[in-house]
Amino acid sequence: MIQATVTALKLPDLRAKIVFTISMLLVFRVVAHIPMPGINLEALRQQFEGNQLLGFMNLMSGGALENFSIVALGIYPYITASIIMNILQPMIPPLRDMARNGGEAGRQRIAQYTRMAAVPLAMLQGVGQITILRQASPSPIDPNMSPLSVLSMLVVLAGGTMFLLWLGERITERGIGNGISIIILGGIIAGAPQALGQSLFGGDSLTGLAIFAGIGLLMVAAIVFIQEGQRRIPVQYAKRVRGNRLYGGQSTHIPMKINSAGMIPLIFAFSVMLLPGTIASYLQTSEIGWLSSISGTMANWFSPANFIYWMFTFLLVIAFTYFYTIVVFNQQNLPETLQKNGGFIPGIRPGRPTASYLGRILNRLTLAGGVFLATIAIMPFFVGAFTGVTTVALSSTGLLIVVGVVLDTMKQLESQLMMRDYESFLK
């Protein structure tokens, strides 16, 4: 692997791609430390110490929210817009036809619609973040800020999201790996030294840290194993004669991954679970007795220190895994595509029997992938209870992002080297 890396750096075009990617990451980290005017950074740090929702938003912003920088929203609005577009495509016929039959032009139009949808979503998320911070005590933002100042802040935040999107697209086009994922990865890695320092000098025992590190390595190995695991469905193409030529007759397979949903179910589940507790914490100070009492109970239930919180998280991750996987699978429309191209699964009739067969396999794989994701999601709770180490908020999501992005980037480097007949990067 080291030799292959050295070889990749010796190639002028690959070296240029790697240098360009690192340069864009440096630009991102510089911009992430430019705070918005009028922000009390000391009060902001106090809010991050105990607010799990802000910790999750900071993770998805690539670490830019903890400074409330001009790119504090990160890429999350665009990710939300992408998820919404994927869900809407099977439901809206024009979008479905554009995705299936529009070719490259159709995909570009959908990508443009996604970018356009990211702007209002960024504004909406900015309103939510500013509202949460203005209601905090002490407030990092002046509660008496004028509406014009709030609007200008929202415009800057939305512009920062579009700037990061532009950076990510440039990395995808001229660098190595998926640019948006690389930016999120850069933020997570940038925050790792601080988290490690807090664990080392925060009173945690060295034995607990060693056990924590060992469990973390096992989690990484399990993520790699599941992320790369797949069920290969054999496919045979019928022979067809056109003129004097014979077409078809090849044998191939459909790779159905165990975890085809990636980290999306975790993002959905944590967003749902963290929001009620955060809202309830602000309603506890209400002068209405019954509302204050109910809010206190809800805040306790939805606290990450409560077992009920993690039980619901486990169930929600499985539910969202099924939902997202089925939506994406139906969007691909594999049975119809196979039938149009003369392909069939040996022993299974084309059409509806093929769809039923693939559906049964998908359900079994999704159950395994959902249980795995749910186990990874609740692992920080049990690891912290067992080792006594205070883990970083939502470390399971961070691990999935890091492992997934690293694997994808390594595969791209491997394909670049294999085209030049060099040793595989993964060996």
Image: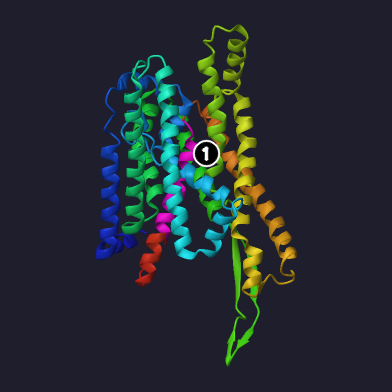
Q: Where does the image place residue 219, in percent across and percent down from the top left?
A: 52, 43
Seen in the image, is 339 located left or right of residue 160?
right
Asked if 328 appears above or below 125 in the picture, the reply is: below
**257 relative to 180 in the view: left or right:** right
Q: Nearer the viewer, residue 76 or 183?
A: 76
Find disc 1 in the rendering and name its residue.
267
Residue 2 in view = no
What crowding class fits label 1: few (fewer than 14 Cα within 10 Å), some (14-19), or many (20 or more)? some
Q: Is residue 58 above or below residue 264?
A: above
Q: Can you name the residue that lies furthest to the bottom here?
A: 244
Relative to residue 78, is residue 385 drawn left or right? right
Secondary structure mainly formed by the magenta segment = helix
Find residue 197 and report its image quarter. top left
**Which residue appears at 48% of the width and 44% of the height?**
81
- Residue 141: x and y in percent read 34, 20
Disc 1 residue type? Ile
The magenta stretch is 392-411
Asked if residue 396 lies in the magenta stretch, the reply is yes
Return the x and y of residue 395 as percentages of the image width and height: 47, 36
Is residue 27 at all visible to an observer of this figure? yes
**Residue at 47% in and 59% down:** 107
User: Picture coordinates of residue 236 (x, y %)?
Assistant: 65, 74
**Quarter of the picture holding the C terminus:** bottom left
Quadrant of the drawing holding the N terminus: bottom left
Q: Name the residue: 36% across, 52% down.
A: 169
**Secondary structure under badge 1?**
helix
Viewer-side residue, 211 vs 396: 396
* Quadrant of res 194: top left
